[in-house]
Image (spheres, rainbow, N blue to C red):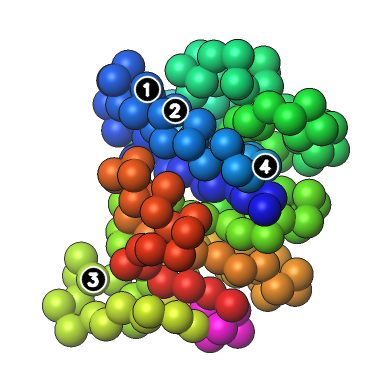
Amino acid sequence: MKIVISIGGSVLAKELNPGKFRNYASAFREIAKDHTLFIVTGGGKAAREYIGVARELGAGEAVSDDIGIEVTRLNARLLIAALGSEAYHEPPETYRAALEAGLTGKIVVMGGVVPGQTTDAVSAVLAEYIGADLLINATATDGVYTSDPKKDTSAKKFDSMTAKQLIELVTRTEMVAGANSPVDLLASKIIERSSIKTIVLNGEKPQDIVDAVSGKHNGTVIE
């Protein structure tokens, strides 16, 4: 299978811990033994801090996004270092470059691409671009809920849902100030238009991502 894994910066790089990067690298090597693997890394706390400073200094949103993208690429480079010779040597900066890098047989690791796209969206577009069989969104939450479980104790998790249901839920969620959606609207629409099988799960344990490839997980499946 061709697999795209989106791993949030809050999961991979909550703190810059070499051991954590090594653990994820080990898990990704295991997946890559049997599958063609592409990974998109988020920026996490560091990206948010840089973007916050940029805004205070008067930078526009597109420039602030560019700064955040650079941080995602730094996280990608750290993961590439952890993967060693099994990874493509640098983060591709376009979808076409990622597709070409994948032809080498190496694990491809990349960060953001253009302003206005979250790494959720980047991973969905990448999955569409390369014709992926599976997209895994490894986040700090264990799936998609009816509402934000951190704020609503009555929130219920979906074991499975359609892409249309996801879009309706995300649209509703994003209209509420301060709300946090596990998959953003653009990513949800890409998933729908290309019928990309997607699993949203808690990625804080690398082995859980490995298990999800074979269908063993406690996340939400979007089909």
Q: Who's the residue at 67% across and 67% down the image?
A: 196
Q: Amino acid at mark 2?
A: Ala
Indicate which disc, 2 or 3, sits on the residue closer to the N terminus: 2
Horizontal arrangement in the rendering, residue 154 relative to residue 167 (left or right)? left
> Closer to us: mark 2 or mark 3?
2
Q: Position of residue 148 (x, y in %)?
A: 29, 71
Horizontal arrangement in the rendering, residue 122 relative to residue 146 (left or right)? right
Indicate which disc, 3 or 1, sits on the residue closer to the N terminus: 1
Q: Position of residue 121 (x, y in %)?
A: 62, 54
In the structure shown, which secondary structural element does the residue marked by tag 4 occupy? strand
Q: Which dot marks residue 25?
A: 2
Q: Main secondary structure of the magenta part?
A: helix
Choose top left, top right, bottom left or bottom right for residue 107.
top right
Q: Who's the residue at 29% across and 44% down the image?
A: 205
Q: Which dot marks residue 149?
A: 3
Q: Which dot marks residue 14?
A: none
Residue 136 lies within the magenta run: no
Q: Nearer the viewer, residue 7 or 10?
A: 7
The boundaries of the magenta stretch are 162-167
Q: Amino acid at mark 4?
A: Thr
Q: Amino acid at mark 1?
A: Arg
Q: Quick check: marks 4 and 2 in contact, CB under 8 Å?
A: no
Gap between marks 2 and 1 measured at Cα:
5 Å
Q: Which residue is mark 1?
A: 22
Q: Which dot marks residue 36?
A: 4
